[in-house]
Image (cartoon, helix red, strand yellow):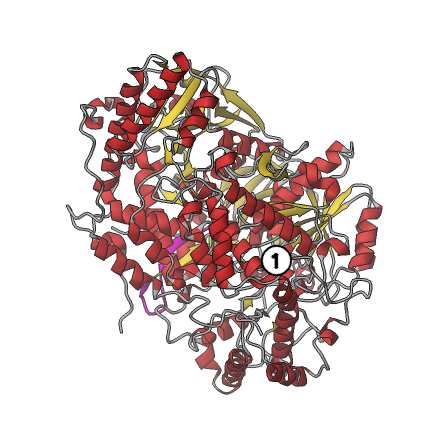
Amino acid sequence: MTPYDKLIFELSKTGRVGYQLDKPLETSFNLADELPINLKRQAQANLPEVSELDVVRHYSNVSRKNHGVETGFYPLGSCTMKYNPKINEEMASLDGFKHIHPLQPEQSTQGSLELYYQTQEMLSEITGMAAFSMNSFAGAQGELAGLMIIKAYHEHQGNTHKTKIIVPDSAHGTNPASAAVCGFDIIEVKSNPDGTVNLKALKEVLSDEVAGIMLTNPNTLGIFEKDILKISKLIHGVGGLLYYDGANLNALLGVARPGDMGFDIIHLNLHKTFSTPHGGGGPGSGPVGVVKKLKDYLPYPAVNQKRGKYVFEKPKHTIGRISGYYGNFSVVLKAYSFIRSLGKENLEQVGRLSVLNANYIKASLQDDYHLPIKKHCMHEVVFDGLKDKSSGVTTLDVAKRMLDFGIHPPTIYFPLVFHQALMIEPVENESKETLDEFIGILKQIAKEAKETPELVKNAPYHTVVRRLDEVKAARNPIVKYKDIV
Amino acid sequence: MFKYFPHTEKDIKDMLEVTKVDSIDALFNGLPTKLGYRYDYNLPRSMSENALRSHFKQLEKKNQPLITFRGGGIYDHYIPSAISEIVRREEFLTSYTPYQPEIAQGTLQYIFEFQSMICELTGMDVSNASMYDGATASAEAMFMATAITKRKKILISEALFDGVKEVIKTYAKYRQIEVIEVPSKEGHLALDLSHLEDIAGLIVQLPNKYGLIEDFSLIAQKIKENKGLMIINSDLQVHSLIKSPREMGADISIGHLQSLGMPMFFGGAHAGFLATTKEHIRKMPGRICGLTNDIDGKRGFVLTLQAREQHIRREKANSNICSNQSLMALWATIYLSLMGKQGLKEVNEQCYKNSHYLEEQLLKLESFKRVYQGFYIKEFVIETTLDRNKLETYLIKKGFLSGIMLEEKQLIFSVTERRTKEEIDQFVCEIARFEHDTLR
Amino acid sequence: MAKVVEGLFYSKSHEWVKIEGNKAFVGISDYAQESLGAVVFVDLPSVGDSFSKDEVFGAVESVKAASDLLMPIKGKVTSVNEALLDQPELLNEDPYLNFILEVELEGAPDLSSLMDASTYLKESH
């Protein structure tokens, strides 16, 4: 079957419509006549003119060129590609939540406010924090808010000399980027070979100027930061704060809480740990949580409970607004539904099952793929390319060959400490059969790399497009339809 | 056993054998003993689907959907039925960011179409794959302007929505950028044209918070003469008929996309957009999709110019933004495809009729007075001698959401194409009743 | 193995400089272009800009990386290689023939932290 290759503009025909509005009001007011000449648009916007069926058919065909979690295994390390439960979608489609204007008076939105507040409370319990704000749109933004809180706190304490944030060299790029956006200087600290923070190196960079440290635990290599209590003591010792990047929280559900490890501020990714759909790159939600002493710095507006009613409040020393309204309400709703569906007893199993899955993969593939860290991993495992690299087959080649078998490749070339990194995260929803199939495919590819390396190097063969020219796209960016007509 | 966990006892036994550990607990033996490896949450127990449905129905009852005459950046526009059906297709809903382009051509294609349509409406050369919302897009535009001009002062119109102004100020604080508000006169921008030499740019809004639409062309010229950037925050709906931001001289065009057929949803999830000229393409934050060929010469799409982004540049990136609001960008793309050239114009024409009709009816009442003389499409300011708080409460009891309260006896009403004559007449009738009861 | 050219000086950050009297040419080494991969964009400064030693004067972008360019010696830009704007791949084809900048030296050049060809060859491998 030839893959679908049309753009919506190419289906357009003058005069076609895909909508039907009500009949206009019968009044003498007429926009066309009364529009001031100097405001009139000159060059027409070339939007498509298509029927409703054209649109539905077009996007249905376009969708088939995508792989989703429901299509097949999606072991992207650090992304926690869980099953997105349908019950969450059903709850998000209720009219009583959909058609509420954000600027309605609080007495008419108690349902939505209660949902926000209860989610905040449950996330606080899960992570060991005192309060949460749901206003951040994504992990990166939650992170930014967290760093703003660190800055505001130190300034308020009169410690304006605290200008440095420590980031391990194994950290995800958003960490230093967010810290830089916030005006901090970054100190990169060396990791041990297993990605954990090198305590000696950390002690060397400690000073009065340290405002805080950004960590994720387990770290980006899937290894638990065993010295976390020591690190916490060291950072607190110089008056710094500990920031937790919640990207890897899945390993800790039912196991331990960041708050108990000494973290003062955390951000979560509802689209990772709490099952809300990734949507092809968003919308997500990156709520930020804090310990008691930082509550007053949370973004505005905060949702609180007062005398049995839910209200918006302005925290005393708020960092300010970070979203036009209250963040991605519809996403928070789905996470709330997820937490209530799982409940205490099932949430407590998530960490255990995802860690079991990852270690099973680790044990099964260590003969074919190079395992740089031998100890038990947490919810994700990192391999550094093929064990036998003599045929010149790279991780990129292996990833492309996986596409031919209908599975989404794991995260590749991250973390940067390994040059041929393959990071696999098999979430708790995946069965032993799925994992065995995945293991089989990877073993097969390793065999092909040895016996018929050219086959792997020129993969994929069964996808709608193959080995796209990214250099061409970057040298001469063609970014809109107008560029090609 | 739980429906989302497939592991049977035998599965676990077999897996532990392969992993060469005695128990799952043993996998956590590297954790500090003080922390332990099991946590007992103080949370409610699992809810069945039936219980969850009842629970949500209870929560829903505590909300009151109203017939809306309020705007302020979020509008009750017509939502075509086809959109949610397409968007919930699992290949769109559950897929990840398109870093493996061969199996994400679906996502990449709609992003390319989205970028194309944003450029058509704004007149710009390049759009990114969407922003979180219009307010954060405005803040990112400010960062672009300060990075490009290397200046640390930005002007913003006081007639931006409050939420937008506040977000800009939050972001500016952490980069030591000085934000100066430009006052309005008679609801329009009153910019002092002297002293523009050290300004990184000016951010204005169209329609502004008073609902008024003005031509910023001359002001844009002045800003550019002083080597600053003109930044226009628009409701894209209106640009089907109104001069595009490019035509007005914008260097950066941003805005909130909720008005493109997205449910109000208590403020989110929606999306924002950011578009600019060719000159500034490499200073744009966010993801960008580009067209290219594959090894067989077939047309295909990839994320491009990624070297500017956070995951590569790290602390040297222009912005820390990682995700976009992809699925909502798809929502906007489908809306624009269905409405097309003609539909958007018609929406505006109906909004115009409806809002002017409401204004006309209100001015017939004793307690209402016109405020501004400018041109508006779907939102207008009106002054009243009535107690606005009591009026709001009264109208909510009758099922209506009245206008936003501004300073000094003013209300701002918004009427979209969704409001029928019956609804508008009934709304005015209730206000008249309230007026009558008050004046008695 | 990446090439070096005799007579040039090399910085730790893989730029090269060729001194000709009170002028100098600046570019990136073969090792640099190899590590970057296919160059897609070069961010050039303007003629007349002045930079001190080790100051960032521009950037080179490939699909997978973006690298700041650091000035190996103090100088004022007298010309930039505009061919790189349309054909950034020239840096991959011949990074020594295709210079990035020409500068006028400001005072005697400080060569202290720079390496000669053979030292750089050893250091970068």
Q: Residue placed at 38% from the left, 20% from the top?
A: B434
Q: Which residue is drawn at 20% across and 27% down?
A: A32
Image quarter of residue C51: top right
Residue lying farthest to the left in this orientation: A15
Q: Is residue B297 magenta?
A: yes
Tell me if A224 is positioned left or right of B351 in this view: right
Q: Label 1 lies in what chain?
A: A
Instruction: Check residue B215 for magenta coloring.
Output: no
Quick one: B111 or A127, which is closer to the camera? A127
Q: Residue at x 78, y 66 (%)?
A: B36
Amino acid bearing label 1: Ala
Horizontal relation, residue A127 to residue A420: left or right: right
Quarter of the image where one finds residue C105: top right
B97 or A115: nearer the viewer: A115
Q: In this view, does A338 lie above or below C85?
A: below
Where residue A133 sits in the image (x, y, percent)?
61, 44
Q: Where is residue A308 in the image (x, y as percent from the top left)?
A: 61, 39
Q: Label 1: which residue?
A: A247
* Residue B68 coordinates in the image, percent (x, y): 37, 34
Image coordinates for residue A358, horizontal then vertical, percent: 62, 73
The quarter of the rendered structure image containing the N terminus of chain A is bottom left
How packed mark 1 is, by other alpha carbons closer than 10 Å (few <14, some 14-19, many 20 or more), is: many
Nearest the viewer among C70 and A246 is A246
Q: Please tell me which residue lies in front, B424 or A297.
A: B424
Residue bounds of the magenta highlight: B287-299
Instruction: Give the side of residue B203 with respect to residue B346, left or right.
Output: right
- Specify whether residue A240 is in view: yes
Q: In this view, does B114 lie above or below B440?
A: below
